[in-house]
Amino acid sequence: MTDAKNEKELQEERKQIITRLLEIQKNFMELEREKGVTEKDIHHNPKGVIKEYKEEHEKLANRLVDIAHQIKGSIRT
């Protein structure tokens, strides 16, 4: 388990990550509507901004899992 100060910092980071993940999701949806971007474009050989969004999303999602484990005092396997 984490101490109260550290947990508060982790919770704040968690909120910021969730906010950014939601922004990325919104941006993906806009690309889908405006440019016809599909799931295939995202998951199979993404390019340009789609690749950047995908990489950032994966990095943030992994950090979110790490934070959850830190808060609960568990180990990620």
Image: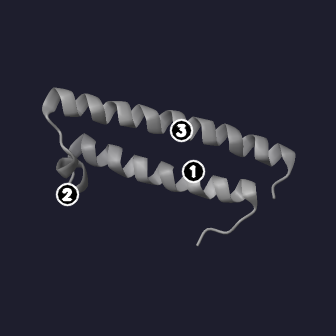
Residue 68 pos. (x, y %): 65, 54
- Does 28 sit left or right of 12 as displayed? left
**Residue under the image location 41 percent in, 47 percent down:** 57
User: Number of labelled discs?
Assistant: 3
Type of amino acid at the residue the image marks with label 2? His
Q: Which residue is mark 3?
A: 18
Alpha-carbon distance for marks 1 and 3?
A: 8 Å
First in sequence: mark 3 vs mark 2: 3
**Residue under the image location 58 percent in, 73 percent down:** 77
Type of amino acid at the residue the image marks with label 3? Ile
Which of the 4 image quarters holds residue 1? Answer: bottom right
Type of amino acid at the residue the image marks with label 1? Leu
Alpha-carbon distance for marks 3 and 2?
A: 25 Å
Residue 45 pos. (x, y %): 19, 57
Does 47 sit above or below residue 33? below
Q: Which residue is mark 1?
A: 64
Helix, strand or loop at label 3? It is: helix
Which of the 4 image quarters holds residue 30? Answer: top left
